[in-house]
């Protein structure tokens, strides 16, 4: 299920419509209102993850472009039916030839970037990599989307 389906909004929904849908669902499924109900607790987590993707314009843009694998969403499999594995392969191959499907990673443009904490996954590099013999594969960090900054 997509984050849009989980929150019950259209892909064209405004941020305010997304917030409103989230509030209603979060109140209904909140663990404090449903003590001991594991299904409600899991539903609340899924609703919260979907909201986190859609309310953040950068994460929403990545989700819309690349599906759940790129956004870090844990909602089912990616559009390729493989949970985003094909996208990861293409990213790694693009890295070998000097680019990724996300384009070149640039330094953050915000003034407050030097005061932000570095991303915990890529340690502020914006890219993560694997050393496979004489190949070094690098892809855009899926946690910070290449910004190098933590949340």
Image: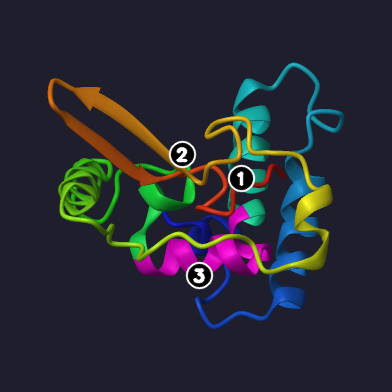
Q: Residue at x 61, y 63 (%)?
A: 54
Q: Nearer the viewer, mark 2 or mark 3?
A: 3
Q: Which residues are the magenta region?
A: 53-65
The colour scheme applied to this rendered structure is: rainbow
The answer for how far apart the CA atoms under marks 1 and 2 are is 8 Å
Q: Is residue 78 magenta?
A: no
Q: Earlier in the sequence, mark 2 or mark 3?
A: 3
Q: Which residue is mark 1?
A: 49
Q: Residues within 10 Å of mark 2 (few under 14, many from 20)?
A: some
Q: Which residue is mark 2?
A: 74
In this rendering, position of residue 128 left or right of residue 93: right
Q: Are marks 1 and 2 in contact (CB under 8 Å)?
A: yes
Q: Earlier in the sequence, mark 1 or mark 2?
A: 1
- Residue 4 position in % (x across, y down): 52, 64
- Residue 30 position in % (x across, y down): 79, 37
Residues 53 and 112: in front is: 112
Q: Which residue is mark 3?
A: 61
Q: Residue at x 66, y 52 (%)?
A: 52
């Amino acid at each position: 299920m997509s984050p849009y389906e989980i929150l019950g909004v259209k892909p064209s929904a405004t941020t305010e419509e997304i917030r409103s849908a989230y509030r209603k669902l979060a109140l209904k499924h909140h663990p404090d209102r449903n003590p001991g109900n594991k299904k409600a607790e899991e539903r609340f987590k899924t609703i919260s993850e979907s909201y986190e993707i859609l309310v953040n314009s950068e994460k929403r843009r990545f989700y819309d472009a690349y599906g759940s694998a790129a956004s870090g969403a844990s909602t089912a499999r990616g559009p390729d039916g493989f949970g985003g594995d094909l996208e990861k392969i293409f990213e790694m191959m693009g890295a070998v030839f000097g680019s990724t499907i996300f384009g070149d990673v640039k330094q953050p443009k915000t003034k407050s970037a030097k005061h932000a904490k570095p991303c915990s996954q890529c340690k502020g590099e914006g890219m993560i990599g694997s050393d496979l013999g004489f190949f070094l594969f690098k892809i855009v960090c899926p946690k910070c989307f290449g910004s190098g900054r933590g949340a």
